Amino acid sequence: EAGVAQSPRYKIIEKRQSVAFWCNPISGHATLYWYQQILGQGPKLLIQFQNNGVVDDSQLPKDRFSAERLKGVDSTLKIQPAKLEDSAVYLCASSLYRSGRTGGYEQYFGPGTRLTVT
Amino acid sequence: GENVEQHPSTLSVQEGDSAVIKCTYSDSASNYFPWYKQELGKRPQLIIDIRSNVGEKKDQRIAVTLNKTAKHFSLHITETQPEDSAVYFCAASNDFGNEKLTFGTGTRLTIIP
């Protein structure tokens, strides 16, 4: 099966500029996640979608970050305006939704977008 | 919220020896514990996971153990090979919640030929 697709792979912008990232999850995966991975750290969840609804955005800096998942498939993450500390790899992941005890779930990660803010 | 601590941050072992990475978690409701391997410049990939109703799980050279009482879990890699060199992340989540994964800070494992 095709994996999670992300674009662009690399982006360099100046601070205060805006940037957008795109993610296409694995077909049929209802849950989509955006993570921020700063160099040397583990991924940190920014936002989680279940179909086109937001499940968790508690760690999303809402004054500058926004995300949407129209039609419950593709998603975009936007930063406006960018700060130096936003330099990181932005990972998109998707998973099948399986409730309760009936099964596990695996989050499949995309290749990420490496953002450098200068 | 959940907090996951991971140790050590770096680990070097001779090829053929075993490697152990340990994680602790804070939320007693967490019941799913995956381990991800991330090679340099690549995406994290799941290598093994364990649920809270199981104490140990093994897959060839990789095993994970879970102690619910102490709230810690460990990754064991035996007969290490050069291709095991990578950064390993543990994570925890509550399947009965929103399945949000909280990751540890990672362990850089280097296998010395």
Image (cartoon, coloured by chain):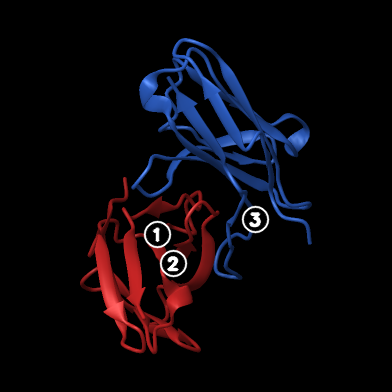
Relative height, residue B44 to residue A10 (above, below): below
Q: Earlier in the sequence, mark 2 or mark 1?
A: 2
Q: Residue at x 60, y 70 (%)?
A: A103
- Residue B73 at what x, y percent from top left? 31, 72
Viewer-closest of B13 and A43: B13
Q: Residue at x 42, y 78 (%)?
A: B53
Count the labels in the image: 3
Q: Residues within 10 Å of mark 2 (few under 14, many from 20)?
A: many
Query: How far is disc 1 from disc 3 in space, using C-alphas?
Result: 18 Å
Q: Chain of mark 2?
A: B
Q: Amino acid at mark 3?
A: Tyr
Instruction: Name the residue tied to disc 3.
Output: A97
Chain letter for red, please: B
Query: In the image, which disc is placed on residue B35?
Result: 2
Q: Residues within 10 Å of mark 1 (few under 14, many from 20)?
A: many
Q: Amino acid at mark 2?
A: Trp
Badge 1 marks a residue whose secondary structure is: strand
Instruction: Name the residue tied to disc 1.
Output: B91
Q: Is residue A55 left or right of residue B14?
A: right
Q: Amino acid at mark 1?
A: Ala
- Residue A90 at what x, y percent from top left? 52, 38
User: Are circles 2 and 1 on residues that touch, CB within 8 Å?
Assistant: yes
- Residue B61 at what x, y percent from top left? 45, 87
Relative height, residue A5 to residue B7 (above, below): above
Viewer-closest of B46 and A59: B46
Query: In the image, which disc is placed on residue B99?
Result: none
Relative height, residue A6 to residue A105 (above, below): above
In front: label 3 or label 2? 2
Chain letter for blue, please: A
In front: label 1 or label 3? 1
